[in-house]
Image: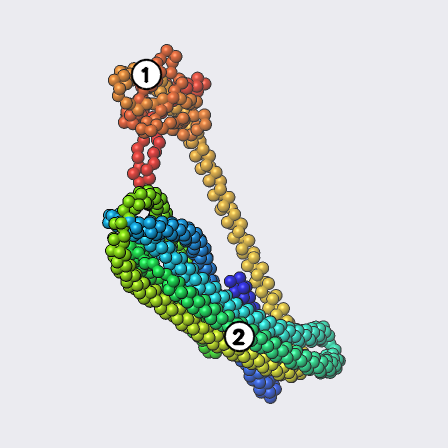
């Protein structure tokens, strides 16, 4: 991804450089247009001054110049369009490479996931093989124990048989009771049944060991298959990485070729600019000389004829110098251009040779890699065939060995163990089927989720592609419209064309930004979808791992239960054998004592016993033969099933070999496609180089045409300058006449202006006198207003003194009110409090205001307000009087009425020096519903 981001950044830089080139081309077009306009203006001015015959010639030359300039503009536009086409081709190629790169990345991620799964499966298979090996070791140890026990039992059986034979030989002479013989026969049968049971247990253990071995072999085969698949995936990853590296190398080579082409183009542009600058310098020098000559001509009007001759001589010399310089420069420029063209062609041929060498080396490397791949694939197929043969030989040997072991076996299999095995197998099959169903459901869910996510991604991509297409179409339509408008209004409105071109460039930048934003959105959506998929897969894996762990734990618990049952049975058998041995020895001793007494009875009954024993042996043999036939048939069926399974595995191996061959074919097809793509790219590069050569030739032709045109222009300019000098002489004469007439007109105008100035001075003096009178009246009015204000201030001070004296009376009334309200407060009534704690010193700060000063206002939680006071007499109680807002309003109203009465006029005599610290504070609060603010008056 880092390489892709680097390539994208490089492509963006490339696009910016190409845009800059387009801007340069547009600037050149504009410069040419300006030159054309300047030339047109010059030609128009000259056409006005020239004679009718010369005018026609100049008009023809102007038309030719216009046609040439139009041709140049058209060629520049074509070059611009070619550059745009090349840009679009490069963008399309970049998009294709980016898509291929993304596809390869997706394949690599899938292969990596498959590789991880194979590794996990291989680890699980290794753990299973290890567990099976441990179980086989434990089973072998149990088998060795059972064999030891069997040997001990056989030895005991032989000793018992010997004892029986001895007792029978001894008791042949004597008769024995029927009951003792029957007891002996029953004991012998019990011992044989126990021996058969132990042998059956041994055979079951052997079968279990064989089944475990088969499972181990299958798991090893699965692990080998997983390893082979992992190797295939690694090969595919390697191939994909090699393809990615090839694409990056091709992309870098293409970028190097384009950079060289750009460098050459820039060199040519610089040379053309340098040539233009030199021409402009020459023109400026020529114009400077002409201006100097004109200045000299204006200064030296007296000696006209001599000056004209000198000017003509200088013009002839200048013409000669300009012709010589232009011819020498043209020769040098041609030589330089020829040398540069030769160098460019040589470099081009060298690059083509280098490209051919690189292509041959790449083809050789590709063929060598193909041969190595073929050899590796053949080796893999050969090793797999050898492994298959080895596995078949091992299976055949095991089959023969097992058949030999089945022939040697002579004991019966216990029916109960078979039933238990069948039940366990059924349970296992049921569990396996359930888990397979669960796995199939999970796979279906995952497939559905993947399909939904793929659909979402496709929808997002389609939307983005549609947006990009619409943006491209809009851009194309706008460019077409602009081109049409330029064609229609080319000659009339050049400024509008420039504005439209700037707007088109801004629109293109905006469109590019939108496209980049859309690409970022698509990347984010793809990234989010991949993260969601990975999270879902990890959850599924965790679920599967938990399920497999539960299965393994169940299997281990079942194995432990079986081993405990085996141990219990072994202990029971050992106890039975010990007890029966003791009983048999005691019974034999008793029988030996009784046999000596009953020899005669035993002789007669032995014959009957022998006959009965023979019949029972025949029956037992027939039963054993039937059972063994059934067992052998079942075993043969099992081996047939195993053979079928091995054949199916062989078929699967063959299918995989076929798949490998198909994959080889696909890889060959891919390689062929890559070679075709490389050839196409080489052809495109060659075509681009040819186009570049053609463009260079065209540019050379253009330079030559420009030189010719400029030389013709120089000659025309010299002729025009001769005519201009003559015209300048005529204009100078006319100018002198006009100056004489203008001087007379100026004197008349000056006399008129002097009369106007005198009239304006008289008017100004009258206005100044009127303004002075108005200013004096305004000052008188201001003095009268100031006196009135001072009188009002004195009246306010007197009213202030009256109010202070009335405040003393109000304080006394408030003390009385507090004393009366003290009882109400004792009853628990809540009355808003007023505490006054500030000093007022007779309007020292606000002498012109009639309002009081309010300080230290404190607002309580219940819209109650406190004013602390310190001017109460010392003998009075604490002024903790609470008044409601309505009571405070009433108090204010009463105080104002008292102060307005004429009785209290004697209070005006109070002096300010007494400084009575009195504060009259009344709080009137109300809530403004709109602004919700408390206002204080």
Give the residue drawn at x 70%, y 74%: 285
Location of residue 755 in the rendering, given as x and y in whole percent from the top left corner: 56, 59
Residue reaching furthest to the bottom: 53
Determine the CA span between mark 2 and mark 1: 121 Å
Please give the name of the residue rendered at 27% of the width and 52% of the height, measured from the top-left corner: 603
Residue that numbered label 2 is attached to:
374
Per the image, label 2 sits on a secondary structure element best described as: helix
Foreground pick, 753 / 329: 329
Circle number at residue 343: none
Front disc: 2 or 1? 2
Vertical placement of 248 versus 525: above or below? below
Tell me which colouring the rendered structure shows: rainbow
Q: Is residue 151 above or below residue 219?
A: above
Horizontal placement of 733 versus 387: left or right? right
Q: Position of residue 868 (x, y in %)?
A: 38, 21
Q: Is residue 856 above or below residue 121?
A: above
**How busy is the neighbourhood of tag 2: few (under 14 within 10 Å), some, or many (20 plus)?**
few
Q: Image height check: is 662 above or below 811?
A: below
Residue drawn at (43%, 34%) of the image: 785
Please tell me which residue lies in front, 707 or 494: 707
Q: Residue 811 vs residue 269: left or right? A: left
Q: Quadrant of residue 214?
A: bottom left
Question: What residue is pinned by disc 1?
Answer: 815
- The residue sitting at the top extreme is 875
First in sequence: mark 2 or mark 1? 2
- Please give left or right for residue 822 compared with residue 125 in the image: left
């Amino acid at each position: 991804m880092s390489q892709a981001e680097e390539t994208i950044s490089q492509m963006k830089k490339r696009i910016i450089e190409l845009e800059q080139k387009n801007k340069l081309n547009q600037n050149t077009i504009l410069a040419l247009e300006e030159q054309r306009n300047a030339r047109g203006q010059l030609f128009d001015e000259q056409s006005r001054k020239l004679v009718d015959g010369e005018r026609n010639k100049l008009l023809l030359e102007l038309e030719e110049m216009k046609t040439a300039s139009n041709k140049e503009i058209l060629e520049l536009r074509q070059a611009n369009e070619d550059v745009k086409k090349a840009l679009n081709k490069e963008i399309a190629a970049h998009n294709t490479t980016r898509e291929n790169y993304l596809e390869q990345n997706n394949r690599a991620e899938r292969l990596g996931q498959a590789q991880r799964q194979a590794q996990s499966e291989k680890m699980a298979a290794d753990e299973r093989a290890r567990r099976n090996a441990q179980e086989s070791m434990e089973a072998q140890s149990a088998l060795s124990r059972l064999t030891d026990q069997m040997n001990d039992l056989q030895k005991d059986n032989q000793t018992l048989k010997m004892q029986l034979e001895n007792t029978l030989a001894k008791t042949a002479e004597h008769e024995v009771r029927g009951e003792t013989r029957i007891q002996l026969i029953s004991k012998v049968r019990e011992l044989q049944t126990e021996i058969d049971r132990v042998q059956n247990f041994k055979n079951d253990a052997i079968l279990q060991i064989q089944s475990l071995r088969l499972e181990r072999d299958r798991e090893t085969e699965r692990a080998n298959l997983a390893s082979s698949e992992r190797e295939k995936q690694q090969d595919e990853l390697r191939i994909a990485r090699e393809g990615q590296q090839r694409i990056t190398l091709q992309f870098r080579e293409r970028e190097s070729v384009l950079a060289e082409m750009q460098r050459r183009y820039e060199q040519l542009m610089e040379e053309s600019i340098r040539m233009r600058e030199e021409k402009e310098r020459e023109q400026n020098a020529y114009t400077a000389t002409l201006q100097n000559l004109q200045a000299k001509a204006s200064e030296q009007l007296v000696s006209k004829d001599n000056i004209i001759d000198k000017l003509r001589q200088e013009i002839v010399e200048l013409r000669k110098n300009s012709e010589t310089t232009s011819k020498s420069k043209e020769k040098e420029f041609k030589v330089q251009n020829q040398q540069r063209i030769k160098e460019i062609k040589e470099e081009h041929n060298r690059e083509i040779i280098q490209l051919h060498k690189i292509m041959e080396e790449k083809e050789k490397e590709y063929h060598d890699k193909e041969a190595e791949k073929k050899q590796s694939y053949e080796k893999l197929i050969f090793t797999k065939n050898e492994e298959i043969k080895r596995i078949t030989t091992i299976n055949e040997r095991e089959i023969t060995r097992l058949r030999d072991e089945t022939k040697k076996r002579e004991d019966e299999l216990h029916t109960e163990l078979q039933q238990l095995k069948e039940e366990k197998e059924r349970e296992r099959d049921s569990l396996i089927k359930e888990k397979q169903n669960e796995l199939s459901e999970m796979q279906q869910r995952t497939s559905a989720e993947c399909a939904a996510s793929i659909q979402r991604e496709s929808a997002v991509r389609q939307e983005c592609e549609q947006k990009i297409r619409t943006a491209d179409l809009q851009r194309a339509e706008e460019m077409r419209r602009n081109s049409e408008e330029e064609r229609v209004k080319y000659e009339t409105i050049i400024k509008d064309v420039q504005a439209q071109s700037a707007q088109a460039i801004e629109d293109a930048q905006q469109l590019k930004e939108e496209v980049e934003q859309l690409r970022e959105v698509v990347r984010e959506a793809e990234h989010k979808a991949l993260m969601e998929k990975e999270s879902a897969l990890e959850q599924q894996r965790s679920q599967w791992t938990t399920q497999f762990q539960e299965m393994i734990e169940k299997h281990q618990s079942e194995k432990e239960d079986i081993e405990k049952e085996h141990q219990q049975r072994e202990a029971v058998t050992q106890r039975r054998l010990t007890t029966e041995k003791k009983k048999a020895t005691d019974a034999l001793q008793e029988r030996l004592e009784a046999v000596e007494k009953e020899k005669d009875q035993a002789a007669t009954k032995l014959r009957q016993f022998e006959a009965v024993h023979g019949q029972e042996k025949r029956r037992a043999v027939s039963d054993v033969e039937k059972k063994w036939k059934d067992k052998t048939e079942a075993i043969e069926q099992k081996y047939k099933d195993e053979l079928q399974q091995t054949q199916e595995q062989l078929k699967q191996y063959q299918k995989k070999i076929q798949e490998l061959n198909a994959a080889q074919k696909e890889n060959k097809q891919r390689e062929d496609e890559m070679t075709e793509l490389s050839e196409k790219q080489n052809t495109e590069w060659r075509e681009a180089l040819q186009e570049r050569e053609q463009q260079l030739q065209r540019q050379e032709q253009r330079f030559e045409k420009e030189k010719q045109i400029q030389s013709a222009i120089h000659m025309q300019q010299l002729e025009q300058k001769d005519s201009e000098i003559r015209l300048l002489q005529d204009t100078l004469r006319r100018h002198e006449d006009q100056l004489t007439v203008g001087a007379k007109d100026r004197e008349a105008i000056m006399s008129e202006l002097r009369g106007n100035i005198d009239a304006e001075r008289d008017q100004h003096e009258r206005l100044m006198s009127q303004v002075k009178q108005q200013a004096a009246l305004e000052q008188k009015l201001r003095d009268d207003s100031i006196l009135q204000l001072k009188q009002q201030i004195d009246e306010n001070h007197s009213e202030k003194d009256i109010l202070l004296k009335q405040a003393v009376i109000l304080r006394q009334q408030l003390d009385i009110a507090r004393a009366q309200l003290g009882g109400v407060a004792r009853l628990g009534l809540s009355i808003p409090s007023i505490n006054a704690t500030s000093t007022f010193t007779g309007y020292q700060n606000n002498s012109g205001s009639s309002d009081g000063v309010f300080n230290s206002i404190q607002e309580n939680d219940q819209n109650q307000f406190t004013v602390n006071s310190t001017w109460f007499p010392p003998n009075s109680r604490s002024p903790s009087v609470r008044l409601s807002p309505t009571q405070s309003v009433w108090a204010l109203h009463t105080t104002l009425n008292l102060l307005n009465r004429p009785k209290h006029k004697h209070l005006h005599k109070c002096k300010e020096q007494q400084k009575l610290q009195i504060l009259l504070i009344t709080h009137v609060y109300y809530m403004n519903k709109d602004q919700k603010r408390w206002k204080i008056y």
